[in-house]
Image (cartoon, helix red, strand yellow):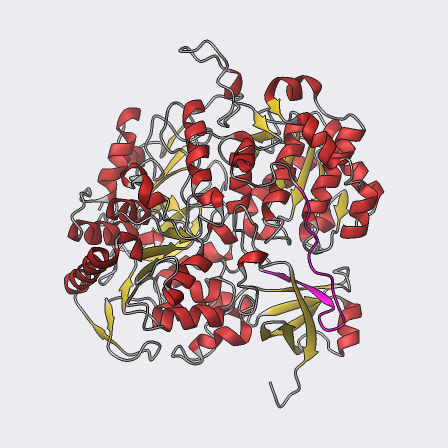
């Protein structure tokens, strides 16, 4: 592969893929071409030489003894950890034979695929494999992460979430809502700090006293799970104080009158009772944002997922629409799909999946945005965005719901799933109710479980085949985030070691055995994507490594040469839909609302916040790297001093976090200003114990996801956002003997 065997060079410029920030890095290699050190690339236009502790530990990650090096086949009971080495060709032949037999007997929908967040450029080819095979059951992490935000963007604007465009000297106000960029995206936090030095004001909405909250001019500290209430109050102030952009609303929005009627009852005083945020602070925020000449809204995934996930995200985007702060410099930018250059969305062969098969997607009969809704949204977006078919990503829309996949495995309803393929994903730790996931994946009703992964995870321990994956250093890089952003290339640092294969190679080799056509290398795919731009992947690597974005600002105002009308937005009405015609057509409430979560009670008197981001780990990953583990050796639950005193614990003590579903243990950190009615627990922490089942790395002991709800009713009812962050709990001390 290009760049992998060129040992004469001593430094290779590429993109770090340890998280979605994807900073530019320079990897130093020895005379044999092996990576020895990582430093920031000063020529990268965004990261500008920055590299975090994970990036600096990338060589340890690449060369860690726990890396999988050879294909393994189970030779004992599931969960026993007993595997034997098997040649790649033999493993793939056996997997393909079993998948074909299952498809012949029960249809291709009896095979499902779950993918995680491996941020390299070839991480989504599983969609192509499954669509060409005929299965609609492709899912993964979108429902637990940024999926509701992207879906709300598609419903409102006709594509995805508008990107905050912070421009120092231009942007006057920055609103961070449930976002912690100093840990999740340090280059973005650096940009915000530069904008603040040139006069921008910072507003932070977050239940936790983060670094960003401490740096803010105004900090709103809502109760967990109340963000949607705050968003509706934000809209109430804009409407009642007539702070909206009349010209923009009149020309470009649909449903304004209905929205005015809906938000009338959501006063700041009402929201103060729900959220704990003073009404005056809500009014101040609304006025500041509406009156700022250039302002950005930057929502993360705040504590309030589940039933209110989509309503919260829609309320945020409607605030942006009412004030007209769209595609103006220093505000939020609506990025269209990449055109003139191919990408993974356009390459995923969605058109080969028949309408009948799409209708059989698991979970779409309940969460209809993933069924008929996906088709409606894509048809509308296609008309507005250059006729690109199916431009909305299948990473977050048109996906199978994991609860429905697990139900189909266990119960056979609405039909049986007999095989599951998992790539760079650990469902045992990632999804709600770990005990249920373990039971499902260990069940004899699941005839085939295949995991393609970098190391043995709890899910891999349960698999029939565990196949070694290449890391980002072992793969070339090419990525575009949208038509308004550059296309970025990075070179492969080193050829895959041992018998590791990339995501693309696994999908290609299995796909060919199933009768599919695939290019020989991912570089061939990149060259096909770049052909219309008149270049190749190799030429990009040898040159600037970037192609400029292809989208002009405010494209919705451009005149379509065919119709003579403005291009408008990729919604059914061609306008920004404050009242969603798609939700209405599907039988859902077309306007944002608020559904109060269950109240606290004496048994569970605390709100449990989960999944706070840390700079030294990505989701469940990086805990096994010694240099990073030394920085942060134990899972942490944050308690307010008042809570710690009431429980009788202090910094460093072990406690039990008890929910209605079970209990886990974490170590206390006392955090002043957190609030006595809430605690904040880190997401899963492993490896803690032996990998065999039980204890399966201690998944039920320390994973805060282990005992959250697995009820469909607790999910967002249109989209299916998972109910992680609206949990109730209590805290109990752990005595020395138990510890």
Q: Nearer the viewer, residue 250 or 712?
A: 712
Up the image or down, 688 lies above or below 123; here it is below
Q: Nearer the viewer, residue 368 or 546?
A: 368
* Residue 302, image x, y percentages: 63, 51
Quarter-of-image position of residue 597:
bottom right
Q: Nearer the viewer, residue 182 or 675?
A: 675
Was residue 597 drawn as part of the magenta stretch in this picture? yes
Compared across the picture, whether 676 is left or right of 487 comes to: right
Q: Nearer the viewer, residue 205 or 593?
A: 593
Quarter-of-image position of residue 75:
bottom left
Up the image or down, 559 lies above or below 590; here it is above
Numbered marks: total: 0
Which residue shows up at 23% across the image and 71% down it?
73
The magenta span reads 593-610
Up the image or down, 162 lies above or below 425; here it is above
Of helix, strand and loop, which mostly describes the magenta segment? Answer: loop
Residue 162 in sight from this viewpoint: no
Compared across the picture, whether 724 is left or right of 466 comes to: right
Was residue 191 drawn as part of the magenta stretch in this picture? no
* Residue 617, image x, y percentages: 51, 60
User: Which quarter of the rendering shows the C terminus?
Assistant: bottom right
Which residue shows up at 30% across the image and 57% down it?
110
């Amino acid at each position: 592969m290009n760049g992998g065997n060129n040992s004469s060079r001593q430094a290779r410029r590429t993109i770090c893929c340890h998280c979605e920030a994807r900073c530019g890095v320079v990897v130093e290699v020895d005379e044999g071409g092996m990576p020895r050190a990582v430093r920031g690339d000063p020529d990268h236009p965004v990261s500008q030489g920055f590299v975090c502790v994970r990036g600096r530990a990338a060589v340890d990650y690449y060369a860690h003894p726990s890396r999988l090096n050879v294909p393994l086949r189970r030779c004992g009971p599931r969960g026993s950890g007993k595997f034997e080495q098997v040649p790649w060709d033999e493993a793939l032949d056996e997997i393909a034979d079993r998948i074909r037999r299952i498809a012949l007997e029960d249809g291709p929908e009896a095979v499902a695929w779950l993918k995680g967040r491996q941020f390299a450029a070839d991480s989504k080819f599983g969609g192509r494999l499954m669509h060409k095979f005929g299965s609609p059951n492709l899912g993964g992490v979108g429902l637990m992460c940024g999926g509701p935000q992207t879906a709300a963007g598609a419903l409102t604007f006709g594509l995805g979430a508008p990107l905050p465009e912070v421009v120092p000297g231009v942007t006057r106000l920055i609103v961070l809502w449930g976002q912690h960029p100093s840990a999740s995206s340090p280059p973005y936090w650096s940009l915000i700090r530069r904008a603040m030095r040139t006069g921008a004001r910072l507003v932070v909405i977050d239940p936790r006293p983060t670094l960003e909250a401490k740096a803010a001019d105004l900090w709103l500290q809502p109760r967990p799970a109340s963000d949607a209430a705050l968003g509706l109050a934000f809209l109430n102030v804009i409407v009642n104080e007539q702070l909206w952009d009349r010209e923009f609303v009149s020309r470009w929005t649909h449903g304004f009158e209905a929205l005015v009627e809906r938000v009338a009852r959501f006063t700041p005083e009402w929201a103060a009772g729900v959220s704990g945020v003073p009404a005056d602070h809500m009014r101040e925020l609304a006025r500041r944002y509406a009156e700022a000449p250039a302002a950005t809204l930057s929502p993360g995934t705040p504590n309030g997922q589940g039933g209110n996930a989509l309503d919260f995200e829609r309320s945020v985007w409607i605030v942006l629409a009412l004030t007209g702060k769209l595609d103006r410099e220093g505000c939020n930018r609506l990025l269209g799909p990449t055109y003139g250059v191919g990408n993974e969305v356009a390459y995923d062969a969605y058109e080969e999946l028949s309408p009948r098969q799409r209708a059989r997607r698991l979970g779409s009969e309940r969460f209809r945005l993933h069924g008929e809704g996906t088709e409606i949204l894509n048809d509308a977006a296609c008309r507005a965005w250059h006729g690109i078919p199916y431009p909305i990503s299948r990473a977050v829309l048109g996906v199978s719901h994991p609860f429905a996949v697990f139900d189909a495995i266990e119960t056979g309803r609405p039909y049986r799933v007999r095989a599951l393929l998992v790539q760079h994903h650990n469902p045992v730790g990632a999804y709600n109710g770990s005990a249920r996931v373990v039971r499902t994946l260990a069940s004899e009703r699941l005839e085939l479980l295949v995991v393609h992964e970098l190391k043995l995870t709890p899910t891999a321990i349960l698999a029939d085949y565990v196949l070694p994956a290449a890391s980002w250093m072992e793969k070339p890089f090419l990525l575009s985030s949208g038509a308004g952003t550059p296309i970025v290339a990075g070179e492969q640092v080193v050829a895959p070691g041992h018998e590791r294969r990339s995501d693309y190679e696994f999908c290609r080799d299995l796909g060919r055995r199933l009768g599919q056509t695939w290019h020989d290398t991912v570089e061939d795919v990149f060259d096909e994507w770049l052909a219309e731009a008149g270049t190749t992947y190799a030429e990009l690597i040898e040159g600037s490594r970037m192609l400029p974005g292809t989208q002009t600002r405010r494209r919705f105002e451009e005149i379509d040469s065919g119709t003579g009308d403005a291009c408008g937005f990729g919604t059914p009405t061609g306008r920004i839909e404050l009242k969603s015609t798609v939700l209405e057509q599907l039988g859902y409430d077309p306007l944002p609302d608020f559904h109060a979560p269950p109240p606290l009670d004496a048994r569970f008197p605390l709100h449990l916040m989960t999944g706070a981001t840390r700079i030294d780990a990505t989701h469940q990953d990086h805990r096994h790297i010694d240099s990073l583990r030394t920085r942060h050796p134990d899972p942490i639950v944050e308690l307010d001093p008042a809570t710690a005193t009431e429980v009788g614990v202090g910094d460093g003590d072990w406690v039990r976090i008890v929910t209605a579903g079970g209990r886990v243990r974490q170590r206390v950190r006392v955090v002043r200003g957190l609030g006595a009615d809430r605690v904040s627990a880190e997401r899963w922490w492993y490896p803690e114990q032996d990998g065999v089942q039980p204890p399966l790395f201690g998944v039920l002991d320390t994973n805060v996801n282990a005992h959250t709800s697995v009820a469909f009713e607790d999910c967002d009812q249109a989209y299916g956002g998972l109910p992680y962050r609206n949990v109730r709990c209590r805290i109990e001390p752990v005595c020395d003997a138990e510890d």
